[in-house]
Image (tube, rainbow, N blue to C red):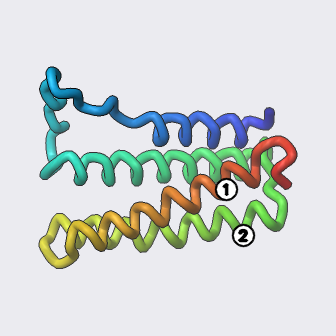
Amino acid sequence: MKPAKALLAGALALAVTGCKPVGANTSPAALAPGYINAQDQNMGEALNTAHGVVGGLLNQATSGSFVPSAAEKASINGLVAALNVADAAYQGYHAGTVTEASAATAVSTVESQQQSLQAQMAPGGN
């Protein structure tokens, strides 16, 4: 597997597994510092994962260890564009100028773009 594909697969595995469901007899995990609520933490973690994927792909492309196809470049650019929108919405949510629902929708778009990129970069995906 190409390093870029391994990076993307690993990052998406982390994003998909997330937290365990809270059962009736378990207490919810404490929020990490800086998060308002569980939804905020989920959105923040999803955006951090996406930034890691983009950063890793950029580093590999810069070093020459990953040369994306034209279709992969277009998908990566789509992910970056969605990430820029989601970052602004997430920051707006924290500033009180964007609703949680709007920020969550923007983050969901990032996750969809990321999943599409993973499928495209999977063996046999091109």
Whether 35 is drawn above or below 3: the answer is below
Q: Residue at x 39, y 36 (%)?
A: 18
The outermost residue toward the front is 24
Which tag, 1 or 2, sits closer to the chain's start? 2
Q: Amino acid at mark 1?
A: Leu
Whether 40 is drawn above or below 2: the answer is below
Dot 1 alpha-carbon crowd within 10 angstroms: few under 14, some 14 to 19, many 20 or more: many
Q: Is residue 97 left or right of residue 112?
A: left
- The residue where tag 2 is placed is 74
Q: Residue at x 58, y 55 (%)?
A: 114
Q: Amino acid at mark 2?
A: Ala
The percent position of residue 51, horizontal first and vertical second, equals: 48, 52
The C terminus lies in quadrant: bottom right
The percent position of residue 60, horizontal first and vertical second, equals: 70, 45
Q: How many marks?
A: 2
Query: SS for tag 2?
Result: helix
Image quarter of residue 107: bottom left
Q: Residue at x 83, y 41 (%)?
A: 123
